[in-house]
Image: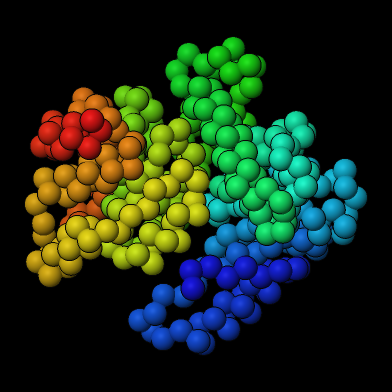
Amino acid sequence: VDWIALSFVQRHQDIAELRSLTSSFCSEDQRQPKLLAKIEKPAAVQDLDEILKQSDGVMVARGDLGVEMNPEEVPFVQKTIISKALFWGVPVIVATQMLESMISNPAPTRAECSDIANAILDGCDGVMLSGESAVGSYPLECVEMQRRVISASEQQQRRAQSRGATSGSATGGWKPPATLSVLNPLMFVRENDAVIGSVLASAVTLAHGIGAKAIVCFTATGRSVEKLTQFRPSMPVVAVCPTMETARFLSLYRGVYATSDRETQVLAQQAEDENAIPSCRAIEVAWRVAADHALVSDPHEWVVVICRLPWFSYGPLNVIRVTNAFESGLADYLTTTTS
């Protein structure tokens, strides 16, 4: 079990009690499931900051929120939850009635498309279908429509975050909110995360500056990737993990391609056994993973690699490296996989 969602959370103690309960069922060497708080009650909104500190994820459950409070308040509560979740580095899912009309119709309303787009533009990590895909007549069409709206929204964000788009003219006048701006990446660096936050902020700034196609992060526990997604880089993040458990829970985070394939696991095991592996081999793995996910297509394209030496060791990140396929010795592999 990777995630457990708790419904009708009203106070942060609810999450603390659930964590204590799940801990009692897990052995010392067993990874504990991540806990996701469903915000459905006004009391939870009042205690939101403390709930976010206790939780590993949060869901904006708008259906019950709309019953428990005035409907006109729900959009603003949704924006508040997304903004605070981003600040605390907690993934946030927006759910309920996103494509409600498609339960019985093959096409959505324009208002529903706007609803999905606004959730993406506000900075959420995921949007969720429920009745549309569970009992609706057009589940595949719902998923495809949601994918299309997500793709269009993310394109707008990338244009707004690119150089020369600060006026908003390239994105129809839309500008990213302050929480998504890459102009001030140190905004999320707090005292207790100063080292890792500063390294990640530098990596994101560098990646945007050189137009990198991806950021590849070698992570032992996933914590570095969790922090990295707070900066909302406009390029994908590839998480290279030693275990499938880490890769699976990281897949919930926005823009993350998490992997722990056989070659990565062998590399991690070698790093543990020998306490050292050739950096060139790790860089080759980073580039191969990016190419396998179709994130790079030209050997001249740049990728930013961040890690901790020794590889897959525990502790703050201490290396940022810029590389391309020629430097990594994978130009021929890249040409083969993309042809």
Position of 93 with respect to 24 (left or right) is right
Quadrant hosting residue 310: bottom left
Q: Residue 191 at what x, y percent from top left?
A: 46, 51
For the point 64% across and 22% down, the residue is 174
Q: How is the image coloured?
A: rainbow
Q: Residue 196 at what x, y percent from top left?
A: 37, 50
Q: Relative to 209, say whether 122 is above or below.
A: below
Q: In which quarter of the image is the C terminus?
A: top left
Most foreground residue, 318 or 151: 151
Residue 325 is at least partly visible in this image: no
Q: Residue 248 at what x, y percent from top left?
A: 42, 61
Position of 181 with respect to 127 (left or right) is left
For the point 19% across and 57% down, the residue is 263
For the point 49% across and 39% down, the residue is 232
Q: Relative to 316, say whether 54 is above or below.
A: below
Labels in figure, total = 0
Position of 13 with respect to 329 (left or right) is right
Residue furthest out toward the right? 70
Quadrant hosting residue 306: top left
For the point 72% across and 53% down, the residue is 136
Most foreground residue, 95 or 55: 95
Q: Residue 62 at what x, y percent from top left?
A: 77, 53
Quadrant hosting residue 18: bottom right
Residue 172 is at least partly visible in this image: yes
Q: Relative to 100, say whether 261 is above or below.
A: below
